[in-house]
Amino acid sequence: MSAALSAHQVTRRYGDRAVVDGVSLTLPPGQITALLGGSGAGKSTLLRLFAGLEGVDEGEIRIGEEVLSAPGRTVPAEKRRIGLIFQDFALFPHLTAARNVAFGLKHLPKTEAADRAQAWLARLGLEPRAGAYPHELSGGEQQRVAIARALAPEPSAILMDEPFSGLDPSLRDSVRDAALDAIRAAGIPALLVTHDPAEALEHADRIAILSQGKLLQEGPAHEIYTRPASAAVAGALGPVNRFRASAVPPGLLHGQAPEALILVRPEGVLIDTASPVRATLLSARMTGPLIRLKLDLNGLRLTALVPPVTGIVPGMETGVRLDPALTFTFASGEL
Ligand SMILES: Nc1ncnc2c1ncn2[C@@H]1O[C@H](COP(=O)(O)OP(=O)(O)OP(=O)(O)O)[C@@H](O)[C@H]1O
């Protein structure tokens, strides 16, 4: 088993602004950790610090017990044996797929490097395209070559910056599944930078939420989703209904102080004809497998996501209750 890659109280400043601010984060081997945050949160900068493409101003980056970065001392990227995958594939245009993958295998005898490159291409379903040049490959194929190239030298960790967001949605799932399966099987730490909460929740084992350079929360994906430590974390993982406890009709909540801030996921707003809490249905729209309902509860507007049921007609009255597992209460906070 390889060692964890970790950041310890790491700060990186541009001018006097800390774009990564006192971040401690451990990437365990064999697991995909998604780094999630809005634009400018500092995700790419933190990835570059892990990679050694930039130095830290404070703190340390380590692999196992070995210090890779400390202020004034940075083991260069090419000495770290860390694989990098970016959104734009970054393949060498003048090399075939096979030679792109073999590029990082120069320490091996030529035939062994070629065999290993071939094996990685086969693993990612690209064997028939081994002799093609990047411009002859589709976006999904190019990204699979980039993934094979990153994994072939048996790196000690892999860092990915929005690697799937440039792909056509019809290709994205298959490329992502092939890539993440191969990465998990390699048993190394892996960081997946993304701004897409759905991608993080579905495909990562752990999620770290970054906002304005600070790590807000980190942990197993399910725990972050069901037990957000703050309203900011709950909001970062998908849409939420937000309101004060005092705005709620009697019977919907139980025991919350009136000033408490309540966040409820749309799938936590349940239609229950037996509930005494009544709501008027304002609209119902298909979103794919679920229907998005807009509800009015005596002036409180809620959005619900429910499985398709018959007999839902705007204007109708129905009963509503909240799923406690998807209802989060914070003592205070901005609406
Ligand atoms: N070389 C640099 N010099 C000055 N400021 C920089 C530099 N690189 C990044 N920044 C700033 O640091 C902040 C964090 O940038 P970073 O690229 O890490 O964010 P991000 O979370 O990856 O955003 P995005 O999702 O938009 O790519 C931004 O405000 C950015 O403008």
Image (tube, rainbow, N blue to C red):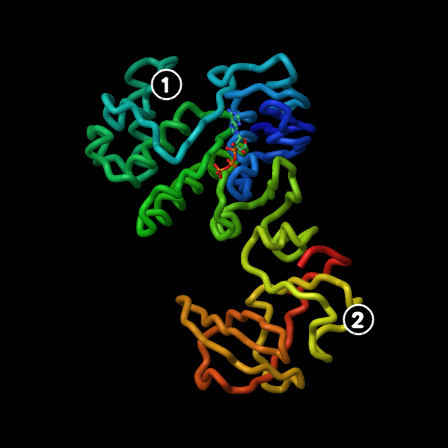
Foreground: 151 or 198?
Answer: 198
Image location (x, y in percent) of residue 55: 58, 19
From this view, report whether residue 218 is shown above or below residue 90: below
Residue at the (25%, 24%) spot, across then down: 93
Quadrant position of residue 290: bottom left
In the image: residue 203, left or right of residue 126? right
Disc 1 target residue = 105
Q: Quadrant of the C terminus?
A: bottom right
Foreground: 127 or 204?
Answer: 204
User: Which of label 1 and label 2 is nearer to you?
Assistant: 2
Amino acid tagged 2: Gly
From this view, report whether residue 273 is shown above or below residue 222: below
Residue at the (69%, 28%) spot, across then down: 9
Residue at the (55%, 59%) spot, across then down: 239
Q: Which mark is residue 255?
A: 2
Amino acid tagged 1: Leu
Regarding mark 2 in the picture, which secondary structure is present there? loop
Query: Which of the two labelled residues, at mark 1 and mark 2, occupies the earlier sequence position?
Result: 1
Regarding mark 1 in the picture, which secondary structure is present there? helix
Q: CA distance from mark 1 to mark 2?
A: 63 Å
Image location (x, y in percent) of residue 206: 58, 44
Image location (x, y in percent) of residue 210: 60, 40
Foreground: 193 or 143?
Answer: 193
Image location (x, y in percent) of residue 139: 28, 39
In the image: residue 296, left or right of residue 184? right
Quadrant position of residue 225: bottom right
